Image (cartoon, rainbow, N blue to C red):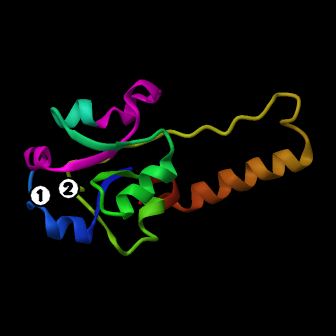
Amino acid sequence: LQLFATRDYLARHAPIETVDDLAQHDFVSYIEDRIEMPELRFFEDTIRNAHVVFRSTNVSAQFNAILEGIGLGLVHCFMARREPALQVVLPQHISVQRTYWLVVHEDLRHVARVDAVCQFLTRILSQDPALMMGD
C-alpha cells in the first residue's frame, strides 16, 4: 500500500514535500478499534494528530472516499494503478507492505480442484512481482 490522493485534491491543498507537510491534510482511514494488522497503524507511526475525516473498515469505502477527493489515504497499489485520477504521495517515504496467506483446510488441500487453484494463485503471484509488491 502507498499513500494516494486525487490530483484534484492535491491541486486544491497545500503542497506535500515532506512527511511533516501531511499534518495540514485530511485523511481517510480505518476505524482505530477495528485495526487488526499492525501494518495498518500508519497514522500512529507516521503522523501525529492526523486529521481523519472519514473512517471505515471497508477498503472499498475508503477507496471511493479517496477517489471523491475527501482526503489522502492508504490504497493497495493494484487498485490505484487503474485510476488515473490518483497520484502517489511521498512514495520514497511512505509504503506499507502487507503479507497475505492462502488458507486451505487440511482435508481439502489435496483435492485436485483446490490444489489447482492454490498452484495457479502461487504461480501468477510469483510471476508478477507487481502483484506481490503492490506496485
User: Dot 1 surroundings within 10 Å: few (below 14), some, or many (20 or more)?
Assistant: some
Secondary structure beneath dot 2 equals loop
Kind of residue at disc 2? Leu
Mark pair 2, 1: CA separation: 8 Å
Q: Taking 12 as reference, is 77 above or below it? A: above
Residue type at numbered disc 1: Ile
Q: How far across and how far down the image is residue 134, in percent?
A: 44, 55
Q: Quadrant of residue 124?
A: bottom right
Residue at image mark 1? 16
Q: Does residue 115 appear to the left or right of 83 in the view shown? A: right
Magenta segment: 19-42
Are the residues tagged 2 and 1 within 8 Å (C-beta)?
yes
Queried whether the magenta region covers residue 23, the answer comes back as yes
Q: Is residue 44 magenta?
A: no
Q: Position of residue 98 (x, y in %)?
A: 45, 41
Residue bearing the label numbered 2: 90
Tell me the element at label 1.
Answer: loop
Q: Position of residue 4 (x, y in %)?
A: 30, 58
Q: Nearer the viewer, residue 36 or 124?
A: 36
Disc on the earlier residue, 2 or 1: 1
Task: Give the mark toward the camera: 2 or 1.
Answer: 1
* Residue in the foreground of this view, choosing between 121 and 90: 90
Q: Observer-nearest residue: 46 or 85?
A: 85
Instruction: Give the residue at the far right of this rendering.
Output: 111
Tell me the residue at 84%/45% (across/down).
114
Residue 76 seen in this snapshot? no
Q: Which mark is residue 88?
A: none
Dividing the picture into quadrants, the one containing residue 53 is top left
